[in-house]
Amino acid sequence: MPTTRGGIAAILLACLAVGGAAPALAQADDPLGVGRKMLAEDNPGELWIERGKSLFYQKRGPRNASLEQCDFGMGPGKLEGATARLPRYFPDTDKVQDLESRLLTCMVQLQGFNRDDVVKRAISRPASDGSDVEALALYITSRSNGMKMNVSLSHQKEYDMYKAGEYLFYRRSGQTDFACVQCHGEANKRIRLQDLIHMTDQKGVQEVVSTWPAYRGAHFVVRTMQWRLYDCFWQMRLPELKYASDTSIALITYLHYQGNGAVISVPGFKR
Amino acid sequence: MGKACLKWTMLSSLALIFAGCATYPDPATTRQMTEKMVSEDFTAPTPALLKRLVQDRSQTICSRIGDAKLTQEEAAEVVKLARASIQYPASGKLVGDWKIGDNLAHDGAGDRIQGGRLEKRKENGGLCQNCHALAPGEINVGNVGPSLTGYGLLRGNSEAIAKLTYERIYNAWAYSPCSNMPRLGATRHLTPEQITHMVAYLLDPQSPINKR
């Protein structure tokens, strides 16, 4: 029997070693922080937080329920630090979910909303009052403000989604032959005058994962990560990315894991 | 006893590997799984437009993950496919009208899909301004690609240069396999005639791009 125990112990150690191999990521220096802080102090996106909060606790939908029983991974209604660990695997849906797909699950299952209706309205029109999902996503993420992004891979489906996201980041297609990396693979690049974030760099990807949802000045509304991805595919001349699809969640899993260690600070402020 | 014990060890080891030791899927599994996602996760007004997501052979070769390098054989295949793709305008004239080319170079619209609709225009924009510096002093230009300022001044406007320029716009991968530059003619984003106007914009001594 000692052999058996020894064998199991060895395997456990091997597992721990693999699990522990994820590098401890240090917080990045941030020379632009002062300017961003000044912008953030006047960030109109702040107004969406209160709205998201009241939407969260209001009894709504055909089932007249609040979202207080929604489990974002830390237990029902526990929002502190929940977004910092998303996407993650949820046993009840047997899926890896990001914030927005999890929110959608709760709006459908707890509140009885029709999934297609919520999805149709999730991304609001520019200069509109914004959508419920946008306000809720911002409120929930704001409850992780000041905390470090800390996505972990342990379930097989989390590993799968991470690798799928990586594959997608480099997957070229369409009439522009673009993957994400064509625009986001080098430092100090611009499309016309718009800075492109260097996402194969740790600091760059940390800036991305810690600042969405964000107030988008050109649209006068709060935008979410799902919107950010949708808009990239649009500009790449590809078909429309389905809201909360696995493709979107895979990319978010990849980016968020790479951005571990970033201090969450929402709403971000984008041009 | 010994046999049973060994069997038990192996079984429990396997169970641990599957239950407790989840790990990254191999590249073939990743590819299969992700391609399935891509085939299910997008919408378009027509099935033909969904085909934009399907990779051609060159795109598959050029989708290298991380710092993975292109092998010599892969590079040669991409170049060969690129050379075979190049079509020339019916007129045979490779240098068109630089003024039309100037407009095209500064036009980034066309063929995007939003709200279930295709952005229909007579012709797509050339997208150059997004990534390349153009005429001297132009501020609103990108830098993902190399500067094109003074393109003709540096190279002259011989027939050989016109042909090279036309081919590089039609299918950049004929010269730089897997570069970031879209294969604008080969993917049908631009027509051969449009490309002749862009050649003129790059080469004509009167073009703003060649003014000092």
Image (cartoon, coloured by chain):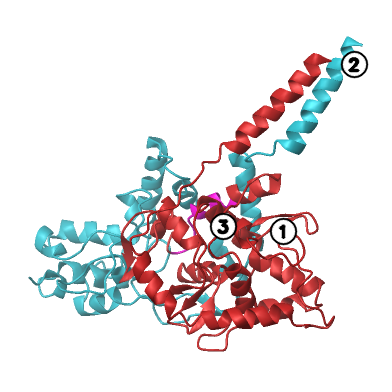
Chain colours: A red, B cyan
Question: Which amino acid, by three-letter code, is at mark 1?
Answer: Met
Quick check: is A10 in the magenta stretch? no
| SS assignment at label 3 | helix
Query: Where on the picture, by quarter, is residue B45?
Result: bottom right
| SS assignment at label 1 | loop
Give the camera-side residue of A79 and A92.
A79
Where residue B150 sits in the image (x, y, percent)? 13, 65
**Mark 3–mark 1 distance (CA, rounded to whole Å):** 22 Å
Circle 1: is it few (<14), some (14-19), or many (20+) Cα within 10 Å?
A: some
Question: Which amino acid, by three-letter code, is at mark 3?
Answer: Leu
> Which residue carries the number 1 mark?
A74
Q: Is residue A171 left or right of residue B174?
A: right
**Start-end of magenta stretch:** A164-175
Same chain check for tags 2 and 3: no
Where residue B187 sits in the image (x, y, percent)? 43, 63
Tell which subunit mark 1 falls on: A
Question: Which amino acid, by three-letter code, is at mark 2?
Answer: Ala
> Which residue carries the number 2 mark?
B4
Determine the residue positioned at 71% across, 58% down.
Answer: A73
| SS assignment at label 2 | helix
Tell which subunit mark 2 falls on: B
Where residue A177 sits in the image (x, y, percent)? 43, 59
> Which residue carries the number 3 mark?
A251
